[in-house]
Structures are given as C-alpha cells and as structure tokens.
Amino acid sequence: MTTQAAQLPLPPAAAATLQRWHAMVERGDFGGVEALLAPQAVFRSPVAHTAYQPASAVALVLRTVIEVFEDFEYHRQFATSDGQSVVLEFSARVGDKQLRGIDLLRLNDQGQIEEMEVMVRPLSGLQALAAAMGARLGGQQAALKGEAGTGQA
C-alpha cells in the first residue's frame, strides 16, 4: 500500500490525525485506529443501508477493510477551507476487481474523525468489496448491528 501525503490547509490537530491515518494505511494496520476516532464516530459504508457507530464498530469495519483491499493507494487529497473536512481519492483491488473511491472525513476541533463516508465505483468492484467484507466479518456482523443499533450490511 502506498499513499501520497500532500500538504493540506489543516488545523494542527487535523493534520496530525491525517498523518497518523496515512501511516496506518502505509503499514496496512489499523490496530490503533480507535485513537483517531471520536467516541460517537459514524461510518457510512457504500454497502450498508445505515451508518455504523460508535467508534468501536467503526474501528472493526476499518480494521477489516484494510485487510480486504489489495494494491491500495491514495492519489489526491482535498480539504475544505476550514480544514475540518477532507476528501481522499483512492484506488484498490479486491480479488480481480479494480475499484476507485473516495473517503470523506469530517474531523472535530480535537482532530478526531467524527464522520467517515466511503464511495466506491464501479459496481463490480463494490460488489466484490461487499462480498469480501461479509465473508471476513461473518458472525461479527450481528455484534456490529447490535452495538451500533443502526448498521446493516
């Protein structure tokens, strides 16, 4: 996995979070991702009807997806003028399916990720991602739904 860290006009706390995020992606290990998440973080998946929350459910999804993606790479980064929202464009592969997508991150004043929404295309890549995530999460999906109260795969 490779990333391209560009200088974005971010507040110091948000910049530190993004730097740690990229380091985790580079290592392919989101073991400490909870430290980057606000306690009531929300994750909107491209394959779920409703959002996953709180941070523990978001962390489980992120730790799983980093294992599913192959050849993951960020290409471009954009930030809002206040530096509280960041868009990260990526490409990856799931099995033999190529995909492109974006991560939309909203950070709080402490630099914690409050909201994350992922969009993926094409449909064949999204379907491969959904199947791989479902296979990896297996029995954990029920726990995710119960904990989140809102998550549905």
Image (cartoon, rainbow, N blue to C red):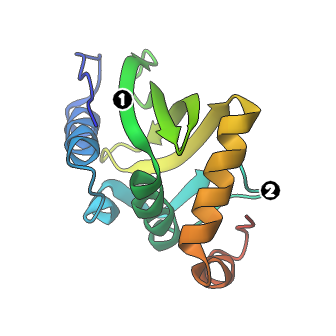
Residue placed at 64% from the left, 77% from the top? Answer: 141
Residue placed at 56% from the left, 31% from the top? Answer: 98
Q: Is residue 136 left or right of residue 17?
A: right
| Mark 2: few/some/many CA within 10 Å (<14, 14-19, 20+) | few
Judging depth in this view, the residue of 63 and 105 nearest the camera is 63
Hey, which residue is sitting farthest front in the picture?
A: 96
Residue identifier under label 1? 73
User: Which amino acid lies under the numbered mark 1 shown in the image of this protein?
Assistant: Glu
Q: Is residue 56 left or right of residue 4?
A: right
Residue identifier under label 2? 49
Real-space CA distance between mark 2 and mark 1, rounded to the nearest whole angstrom: 26 Å
Q: Which mark is residue 37?
A: none
Q: Percent position (x, y) of residue 80?
A: 46, 18
Judging depth in this view, the residue of 146 and 73 nearest the camera is 73
Q: Looking at the picture, does residue 133 appear above or below residue 104?
A: below
Q: Give the quadrant of residue 118.
A: top right
Q: Quadrant of the N terminus?
A: top left
